[in-house]
Image (cartoon, rainbow, N blue to C red):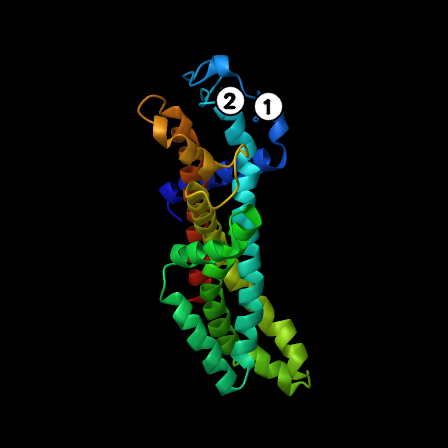
Amino acid sequence: MSASRRVGMLAALVVLVAIAALAVAPQLFATHDPLQTDVRATLLPPSAEHFFGTDQSGRDVYSRVVYGTGRSVGIGVLATALAFAVGLTVGALSGVAPRVVDAVAMRATDILLAFPEFLIALVVVAVLGPGPVNVAIAVTLAAVPIYIRLARVQTRSLRLAEHVEAARILGVSAPLAFTRHVVPGVVGALSVLATIGIGSSILAAAGLSFLGLGPTEPSPEWGLMLAGGRNVIGQAWWVSAFPGAAITLTVIAATIVGRVLRARAEGRTR
């Protein structure tokens, strides 16, 4: 790895560690109650008292960004974890299933892959209704086809590997050989994809919240905060700028780490 990539990877890891700390213990970093309003302090610019300024209700934007980390990142992580689990299960079973079952599963996956992920998530949450849980379900259903496809490809490749054939020759049963020698390899491949997918899921969840389909006021959530400041962006740019920067920084950091891990995995494979 080059020096520049090493520096980028280190910076991305530092950002992700900081994001994790904010998500787990926001009370240690926030300076104000994220829900407390003050009509006398509306739209104040960034200052020593309010690091990121205040919004239309006089709420501290910095504290709302801090508390919004757990909600925004949590939805993305939950959706990625669910997509990982569903993709692993369906893709691995499809990889060892009879040809007819495999064909049906893959055609359904191909249909979903033909549409943009955000469009699928938008349709699903429009049917289920707004709310953080429904947003997580929508983002999961939008992301799961790529996990199914990768799990199926990895399963079909690993089941024919030499070490799996050797285990079968030594008398290991097919289910045990599959669980012990195939599934771990599939999990490893999906883990790299999930690292990149977390950023995409966070971005999709924030986009749905921006459209008013996620958490509702006064919940501190990055996409919702971004939408709340769009009408005053000319007067108070900080209301939208800081939650937007939080989304961008988190997605970039997760993507950098995911791409580095993918490059290393591909190098080991070669």
Q: Which residue is mark 1?
A: 33
The C terminus is located in which quarter? bottom left
Residue on which disc 2 sits = 60
Mark identifier at residue 84: none
Lower position in the chain sequence, tag 2 or tag 1: 1
Residue 165 placement: quadrant: bottom right
196 vs 170, left or right, is left
Residue 75 in the image: x percent, y percent?
Answer: 54, 47
Q: Residue at x 46, y 68 (%)?
A: 150
Secondary structure category for the residue under label 2? loop
Toward the viewer: 46 or 191?
46
Q: Residues within 10 Å of mark 2 (few under 14, many from 20)?
A: many
| Amino acid type for the residue under numbered disc 2 | Asp
Marks 2 and 1: CB-CB under 8 Å?
yes
Residue 161 in sight: no
Q: Nearer the viewer, residue 75 or 2?
A: 75
Q: Which SS class for mark 1?
A: loop
Residue 65 visible to an observer of this rendering: yes
Q: Is disc 1 surrounded by few (<14), some (14 to 19) or many (20+) residues within 10 Å? A: few
Amino acid at the residue labelled 1 = Asp
Which x, y percent locates residue 181? 61, 73
Front one among 3 and 264 = 264
